[in-house]
Amino acid sequence: MSIEICNVTKHYGSFQALTDINLTIPKGELVALLGPSGSGKTTLLRIIAGLESIEEGGILFDGKDLSEVHVNQRDVGFVFQHYALFKHMTVFDNIAFGLNIRKKRLRPSKKEIEQKVNELLDLVKLSGFAHRYPTQLSGGQRQRVALARALAVEPKILLLDEPFGALDAKVRKELRRWLRKLHNEIHVTSVFVTHDQEEALDVADRIVIMNKGKIEQLGTPSEVYDKPASPFVYDFLGNVNLFHGRLHKGKLDLGSATFDAPDHLHANDKEAIGYVRPHHLTIEREKQSEEAIAAKISFMHSIGPTWHIEMKREDSEAYVEVELSKEDYAQLQLKVGEVVYVSPKEVKVFIPEDFVI
Amino acid sequence: MKKKHKKRNILPGFGLSMGITTLYISLFILIPLSMVFIESSKLGWSEFWQVVTNERMMHAYKISFATSFAAALLNGIFGFIIAWVLVRYRFPGKRLIDGLIDLPFALPTAVAGIALTTLYAQDGWLGQYFMAIGIKISFTPLGIMIALMFIGLPFVVRMVQPVLENLEREVEEAASSLGATKQQTFLKVIFPEVLPALLAGFSLAFARGLGEYGSVVFIAGNMPMKTEIAPLMIMTKLEQFDYAGATAIAVVMLLVSFICLIFINLLQKWSRKHELQDE
Amino acid sequence: MTVDVSKYGENRMQYVTHKKKQVNWTKRILVTVMLLYLSLFLLVPLVFIFTKAFEQGAAVYFAAITERDALSAVKLTLLVAIITVPLNTIFGVAAAWCITKFQFRGKQLLLSLIELPFAVSPVIAGLVFVLFFSPRGVLGPLLTDWGIKVIFSVPGIIIATMFVTLPFVARELIPVMQAQGSAEEEAAISLGANGWQMFFRVTLPTIKWGLLYGMILCNARAIGEFGAVSVVSGRIRGMTNTMPLHVEILYNEYQFSAAFAFASLMSLLAFLTLIVKSWIEWRTEKEQQV
């Protein structure tokens, strides 16, 4: 089922949670809503589910307006952030809940329910756990029970609120891969909320990046990572170095160096900022181009296969961070206190006032 | 497409639960209590004033206030100590004692009343020893205070106890790591944290003491101008079918209760302000 | 700087043994103060009630509690409790539901109103219903015409008891439901449950201990209420006498053994309440630890 969100707005008292959101999610995709806390991503997810009412706009499933349809009639499966498992019920009863409460005429027989629950337990790899209580399970197991419970009613849409938020790093990675696989098998349109960019990039077909109740960018993981549409997205998806300067006819003038800015050929003497990722900077001993900036190395440390070099620009006292592979680092033989030249392989220039509302 | 939607609740039952709640509150609380004010307005102002300020009445207020205040104060001190001991120390029989604290909530006030009266009478188990040093308890204001101490104890303990339990040990450890002595840690770190709850417990015990009837009526002896309490005055007027007079006294007492209630609410707001706001 | 680890260990041992030998005087004093205070006010009176009750032997004791007026007082009190507790439970659940699950204006006011009966003297509680229902009260003439008697009869006792015990269940449930949050209920609804299914299958099982706790307290107060009932009952022997009123009458007639015998019966009920209460606390504590 496809989801269409048209002009949706939501307030909590005087707080504007969502402003005029428009979004289409194609059938069968796995979409991540990514943003910092307070960006409105959970509100949007709860609105799609019908757990939150909307003031303006519409929610359409397969072209049908469901804005006024109650959550228990929407055919959505919702996985809650802290699972919201029924503590007084066994795993089996939790999963069977959605089927057990159906009207007699629509309810499957006891046998069918049992079969269905066992299938789901297989699917989430918890076959031996049917008669345990939620408190006797680990966090990852609870998460999978919550998912099985949501899937039991065969929802047309699966919604997950921070599905891996409460788990430790290792379990999180495992479950993430497992969710990806599961989605490939059952292919139900799925939306999940996360504040972890790595998680979104890793799992989703498409990412919606949100900030302050608005959508900043929508695209595939590689699109949003390689071509951020705004300074916010640049900053949110990984580390970034900022170079303040003046933009003039396709050139960003930093004082001691000049960057090419081919996107802004018509700009005329405007303040602007160049965004460069740490791994898009190269280090040289000599100034070989007018893009190179002198900087003094202040600190170096390695995290796994990469070296992080922290330095201070000679012209402005601003910090610059560079990431080098182990090989490049070994070749350069850098020393703390040495003055070197950094130049960008790739720059994206934004004019701040374009992004001020 | 721009559509406006009505505000809608996701969970069901708002109308039903709100309906039941307001029905009960109107039938059992609002309408009956408003009767007091309507009925008392039948008296003229000067007559009302005369009823609520005559000499016997003034004496009853004095007794009620003094004994309630003294009892609440003593309960504040000892209730704090008891809560502290129950939270901080381990000793045999702790669970039993913790359960016993609620006895005044569970024991009918009349039962407590006759037990305390006989116990603290001149020839009673405990009263005889006090009598030996010249202190008469039953049928004196001291007796009223004893009954109110019995009634009010759990209010203080049960307000303070959870706050002490939730105090983070780390805060105290931080204080002593910064060089504070045990006394300083207690006075500057622990006590301010517990103070709102302690005051709230005190006010609850005080408010309850003002209105208490069952346990006091036996031990007081009810001698006019000596050991009559305000609620008893209402009772006396009712027995003489002086409804207007009874109501006038009730109005004064209700106003005092409201003030106590507002004070307690403010205290709770104040203590909530101290809590860190979760995201 | 080098640290001699073995020496450090030694010092530590010394420190520990030193600490063990030292008597914690603060603890001793405070525990003693507590025990004295509680004995004087709680324990001695309790022991006293039972001693006094059996002063004149078991025969007198059993005669006192099986006498005709005594039995009718027990019956009336149980009737009052059986009607009051369920009615106030319905109110408590409804009030806790709308206060904890929804946002609306005037919530704070509603909370204060629910607590109001705690702040009002029981005598005033009785008085307001006398003003309302007595022959000289607002509804009095109407009720007299219809031949219904509320004051100095059973309905009045029930109404006054309801007023006094109204807050108990709500007060226990509100914090429990606030801590619980709404996620489980939302999960049930999103799985297709209707309101009653959600309530009976999800909400009720999660609040059952808090609910029971509130009902127990409500029941204890309903049984023991004296002031309010005393005003509205008229103390007609064998008719409108509840257990606490019966105790009062016996006491005022100088039948001390009988009065204390009856009082001991009510103390047993209070004990039972405390035991169930402690048991619930112990259960919820255990559940929270898992």
Image (cartoon, coloured by chain):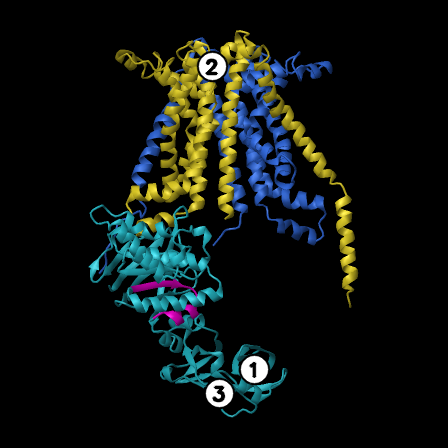
Q: Residue at x 41, y 80 (%)?
A: A348
Residue flagged by tag 3: what amino acid is it?
A: Glu
Mark 3 Cα-neighbour bin, 10 Å: few <14, some 14–19, many ≥20: some
- Is disc 2 in contact with disc 1, using a CB cutoff of under 8 Å? no
Residue that badge 3 annotates: A291
Task: Report x, y in % for residue C50.
Answer: 58, 18
Instruction: Give the quarter of the image for residue C195.
Output: top left
- Callout in the foreground (1, 3): 3
Mark 2 Cα-neighbour bin, 10 Å: few <14, some 14–19, many ≥20: many
Instruction: Give the quarter of the image for residue B148.
Output: top right
Residue flagged by tag 2: what amino acid is it?
A: Leu
Mark 1 Cα-neighbour bin, 10 Å: few <14, some 14–19, many ≥20: few
- Callout in the foreground (3, 2): 2
Task: Report x, y in % for residue C113.
Answer: 41, 32
Magenta stretch holds residue B96: no
The image quadrant where one finds the N terminus of chain C is bottom right
Eyeballing the image, is A109 above or below A35? Answer: above
Q: Is residue A185 visible?
A: yes
Q: Is residue A188 left or right of residue B86?
A: left
Q: What colour has chain A?
A: cyan
- Which chain did the renderer colour blue? B
Quick one: A243 or C30, which is closer to the camera?
Answer: C30
Q: CA distance from mark 2 to mark 1?
A: 93 Å
Range of magenta residues = A189-204
Query: Could you tell me which secondary element the residue under label 2 belongs to?
Result: helix
Q: Which mark is residue A315?
A: 1
Q: Residue at x 70, y 17 (%)?
A: B130
Q: Which mark is residue C245?
A: 2
